[in-house]
Image: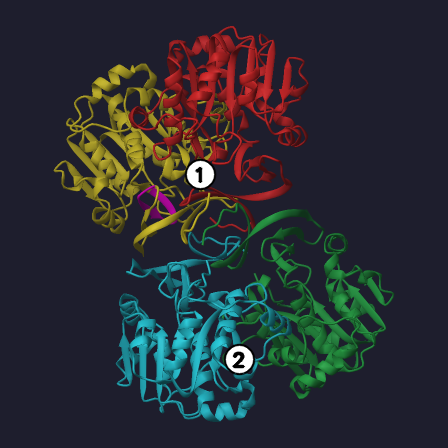
Chain colours: A green, B cyan, C red, D yellow
Amino acid sequence: MATQEWNWYVEYTSPHHGYMYAVRRHIYSGETPYQRVDLIDTFIFGRCLILDGRIQSAAVDEHIYHEALIHPALVLHRNPKRALVMGGGEGAVLRELCRHPGLEQVVMVDIDREVVELCRKHLPGWHGNCFDDPRVEVLHMDARRYLEDTKHRYDLIYSDLTEPEEEGPSRLLFTRQFFELVKNRLAPGGILTVQAGCFSIDLLEAHASIRKTLQQCFASVFSYHTYIPSFNANWGFLLASEHLDPLGVSAAEIDRRLDNLISPLKFYDGETHHGMFRVPKDIRSALAQDGKVIDDDEPLSLY
Amino acid sequence: MATQEWNWYVEYTSPHHGYMYAVRRHIYSGETPYQRVDLIDTFIFGRCLILDGRIQSAAVDEHIYHEALIHPALVLHRNPKRALVMGGGEGAVLRELCRHPGLEQVVMVDIDREVVELCRKHLPGWHGNCFDDPRVEVLHMDARRYLEDTKHRYDLIYSDLTEPEEEGPSRLLFTRQFFELVKNRLAPGGILTVQAGCFSIDLLEAHASIRKTLQQCFASVFSYHTYIPSFNANWGFLLASEHLDPLGVSAAEIDRRLDNLISPLKFYDGETHHGMFRVPKDIRSALAQDGKVIDDDEPLSLY
Amino acid sequence: MATQEWNWYVEYTSPHHGYMYAVRRHIYSGETPYQRVDLIDTFIFGRCLILDGRIQSAAVDEHIYHEALIHPALVLHRNPKRALVMGGGEGAVLRELCRHPGLEQVVMVDIDREVVELCRKHLPGWHGNCFDDPRVEVLHMDARRYLEDTKHRYDLIYSDLTEPEEEGPSRLLFTRQFFELVKNRLAPGGILTVQAGCFSIDLLEAHASIRKTLQQCFASVFSYHTYIPSFNANWGFLLASEHLDPLGVSAAEIDRRLDNLISPLKFYDGETHHGMFRVPKDIRSALAQDGKVIDDDEPLSLY
Amino acid sequence: MATQEWNWYVEYTSPHHGYMYAVRRHIYSGETPYQRVDLIDTFIFGRCLILDGRIQSAAVDEHIYHEALIHPALVLHRNPKRALVMGGGEGAVLRELCRHPGLEQVVMVDIDREVVELCRKHLPGWHGNCFDDPRVEVLHMDARRYLEDTKHRYDLIYSDLTEPEEEGPSRLLFTRQFFELVKNRLAPGGILTVQAGCFSIDLLEAHASIRKTLQQCFASVFSYHTYIPSFNANWGFLLASEHLDPLGVSAAEIDRRLDNLISPLKFYDGETHHGMFRVPKDIRSALAQDGKVIDDDEPLSLY
């Protein structure tokens, strides 16, 4: 395999391991008050949004990430009316939520106004103009402060946040105290979905800790997972609620429930769902043992 | 994420994309008549066998690859007595096969004697001394020639070959003509398992072509997949036979069938099986369309 | 030494060797009809102009390259009136030439209008507005065609061209036939200066060949050299004329001749001159043996 | 420029800049009590000795480094009898010193016995069996302690040490106090030569500080420099004594003094000498301003 490219992005997953991908075209680079933003076109992943050096989503597979994040909770809840998204600056979570005709209100709280504006401009395929859907409201503030202040209750809450770094904006959005707060803002029967990091036998610590922390607050916590090419990783998600049975709904029933979507999905359906919620034996064993409860006093820091 | 390492391996998956991993300790480098061999200890994957610059297996997750390759066919066949492995130099396929008390004969055909000897010396955890199991016979010759000459019929045949490169030794081991030959060496009810490359929406061409080629020869062909950390990829496998129903066996029944193994598995069980054989919707769509039949006259070349 | 950067440029000097430098800020990327252009700000070299993946000049040290290219011939000629520059898109050669009050006419022939315009906009420190100097004329055409057509004779001709690549625009500007043409456009006593590639014991082939080719056409050919940090290399230049004695002028005399410059130099003076024209013994030996005459029929291709 | 190599060494000169070179063959890796050692064969530099991730010398150009380090002081001293080398584990400094028939005693003090033994085994071209020359004595101890304890006086002392790192073995061998100690161990008319780091306008800090520190102790201090390909850098050296006039000896006289060497040199001669001791104007200006005296209380740390 020969290469002639000269402009590369390198994304380290540890001091000993990284990915590199060549830049086809450079779109934008800048600093917001919260993070460094790069928008580039790559050869194999298409356009990519990169925050603080880490790919957040890519044209080739953002549908996998966003369909996997949004639809399982929607399908399992049966009758959601109000959804809250924390993070989700690209707008693709809005696009997925807006496919559901039954949703009446979607609130997105993303602290970084500049990132949202850059995504509206440069990632039209991501948001599909859903920022203009009358059901959608976008707020630019700290998600924790929003939850502390709001009087609303939500049927579905989604955590679509960047991974917690020592000084990063999402540092206190993965702790036991925060998840207690989230729980109190869920309506009865409500479901929290959390994007929850790498999901593989060599990189399970963050997922295991977020899972263990959620288990302190919720009676029913399930991991699910799928491979995301542009993350170069198998990715994990967590569902948390008072009662859930993700494998208790047949693939056919899931397909039936998706029938009324305004537009069809590319990645998620009943068979996909049943694949995602089945976890290999070695990871099940590791999840039973690894991870520790994350506390405000000692937040998770991945890097 | 900061790094201080200075000795890196870079594995390109395309001229525009690669992985890099730091060397913790260098074990061996050399050239056999067939390929370049590197054995290194890495920080996150442990010891790695690298052929022609590509990781073949790694301590941290070779159990995933080898259990996924070997056990589904064994579980679905019910009563296999004779198994043939093409490739498999590390010996870990032998280790997995030898766990099955019912197997009476295991033949491994790997063209590269030097690689096998290096693995016996440097990868003891891989083969677990199964080269000495009395049921095992190892031959160093071209697998195609072996199949052309042999009078034996096998219940299980495994293709554990390096990916086909233009001048590589496995170039003619992924063609329609070759799979016809394999089919004729299977005993009635026999199953062929093929390690079949990347299995993700951005890198599906090779898998789709091998699948389409197998479908020319076998009535029943199934893809399954799992994430392999040291491949930095979701990996695909193919089962081919005259009649198969991988999802028709319950997870509980699979676990029961595995009960009589001589030693327990780490990765594969009933739940794992049911996850592996469920394929996301976007990949199912792509597999229905992509790929072309591979012919001796125009073999597949990945790079 | 730890690094946390994620956006790197890699410049290969061979398939086995390269340099990498992190991008501080991305300024511009695009394609002209002739080449790919990148303008970036780096951490250690400041702003860089990159053509086809190779740094052409950098803020931190373009004064070294351009003073070394321009002034030796000016100092040795004594009374130049008319200068021609082939290439030189950044405009820094104009800046250096315009320091000489005695020059009456400066013609620059650079084929790539877009590069020149990008440099005027993004590299003000390079050209110092010398494009507006009344003595300067800029033409956008092939330098060889210009020389074939022009009636003018020049006291000084400078070749400040990108390195010849197989399909690149400067492919036929380093051949014996071309240098004959140049010679015929020099006024009596005129001097040709050529930027002439790496000048080190491991990378001398291109310089040796250009030197040998010049020696076919000119009675007097001298190599000189200096280290250019942003090229990660010791760089060579060639002076060609009918009679030259670069070491026959004392350092003090050179300093005196530079006294009348409109503005002072940073890098070049008498002592610098005497260092540049002294060549280490091993390179002198290699130059006596290596290289071959470059012909229109078989142009030099560096990569 | 395309590359197909997969095993690379990366040497960072700053968090923002590095070099990379492919491994042709791996010879040895290990840890001594003092440093990490790698011996590799590269494609363009041949065999390389790498200490703590930094190339110390390479087959292709170790003659440049070692001739430049050793011979100027030998030529300027006229009648040296006793030489001391601090560091120099490869043995190539011994090889150069042993060419001088007039030298009667050569003492080498290198703290790392294992590195010396590895070099004797794997770098025969470097030492040329000079470890067995009857004039040579090798001691494995801290150079500072040796100087504190010894009763000997030396005509020539060479500092061929790795660059000072915070916890490295040469941390206290570049300070004012240490150079005072060295001065007291020089015989009358004795000369100290110090390998003194990068010598370019962007990387001059270390050289400038070592120079300024030497100037506190010695009446006469001169910088000289040459390009070393495998260092990817122009490299600086310092001569310190009570009276020196490096440019006061003509090139012809230097060549004459080298006539009596036991075997001829490849790099160094009179012309080379006169090039090396001439310093470009911008670096002369920077040396006049930059750098600070290095004290035991605050040693220089490059990384």
Q: Is mark 1 on a helix, strand or loop?
A: loop
Instruction: Give the labeled residue for mark 2.
Output: A280
Q: Residues within 10 Å of mark 2 (few under 14, many from 20)?
A: many
Q: Picture coordinates of residue D297 (x, y %)?
A: 44, 41
Residues shaded magenta: D45-56
Is there a contact, CB below 8 Å, between mark 1 and mark 2?
no
Q: Picture coordinates of residue C104 (x, y %)?
A: 60, 9
Q: Which mark is residue C293?
A: none
Q: Picture coordinates of residue D54 (x, y %)?
A: 38, 45
Q: What residue type is labelled 2?
A: Pro
Q: Furthest residue to the left?
A: D134
Q: Which mark is residue C303?
A: 1
Tell me how far mark 1 sits from mark 2, CA to CA: 49 Å
Inspect the magenta stretch and tell me whether residue C280 lies in it.
Answer: no
- Which numbered mark, 1 or 2, is in the foreground of this view? 1
Q: How crowded is mark 1: few (under 14 residues within 10 Å), some or many (20 or more)?
A: few
Q: Residue at x 50, y 90 (%)?
A: B254
Which image quadrant is residue D215 in?
top left
Query: Does the image show residue D302?
Result: yes
In the depicted structure, whether residue A138 falls above or below residue B221: above
Q: Picture coordinates of residue D71 (x, y %)?
A: 26, 27
In the depicted structure, whether residue C3 falls above or below residue B142: above
Q: What element carries label 2?
A: loop
Foreground of the two, C257 or A121: A121
Foreground of the two, D9 or A140: D9
Foreground of the two, D290 or C132: C132
Query: Does the image show residue A90?
Result: no
In the depicted structure, whether residue A135 falls above or below residue B9: below
